[in-house]
Image: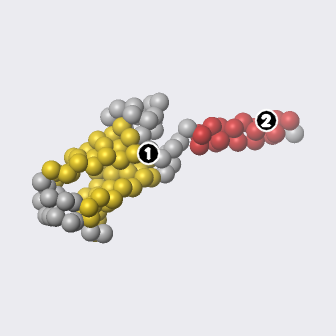
Amino acid sequence: MKKIFALVFTLTFLLLYYDAYAHSPKRIEIQVTGSIVKVKVFHHVVNARMHYVQYINVYVNGKWRVKQKFVYQQDEDYQEAVFNIPSLKNRDVLLIIAHCNKNGRLDKTIVIHR
């Protein structure tokens, strides 16, 4: 009985430990120059190959345009991506959604002003 209790306790601890260090991205910066959209997702991690921004989706006026998928994070503090969206025009609404491979997501919306 003690062995089963110890096993259950250990598994519970490991699952809680895993979730404690999994978190959503904290902030998104978006820079638009012409048709180029630069995205920087701030997501501090200890091991950028195990816990990272897994993908970034870009929507323009509510329609999905492009998705960039990653297999690791380029830096322990952030992930960057650059997109070329030639159809962008003044007053378009740009939605960026960043997903963590462990837990959660963050999104940011901007209106393009030229």
Q: Residue at x 65, y 41 (%)?
A: 16
Q: Which residue carries the number 2 mark? A: 6
Q: Residue at x 47, y 30 (%)?
A: 46
Q: Earlier in the sequence, mark 1 or mark 2?
A: 2
The secondary element bearing badge 2 is classed as helix
The secondary element bearing badge 1 is classed as loop
Q: Residue at x 44, y 44 (%)?
A: 26
Say few, some or many: other residues with alpha carbon within 10 Å of mark 2 (under 14 / 14 to 19 / 20 or more): few
Image spot of residue 82 (x, y percent): 21, 46
Quadrant position of residue 74: top left
Quadrant position of residue 19: top right
State which quarter of the image contains the N terminus. Answer: top right
Q: Which residue carries the number 1 mark? A: 25
Image spot of residue 18 (x, y percent): 59, 39
Quadrant position of residue 52: top left
The answer to which of 50 and 2 lies nearer the viewer is 50
Q: Is residue 109 left or right of residue 8?
A: left
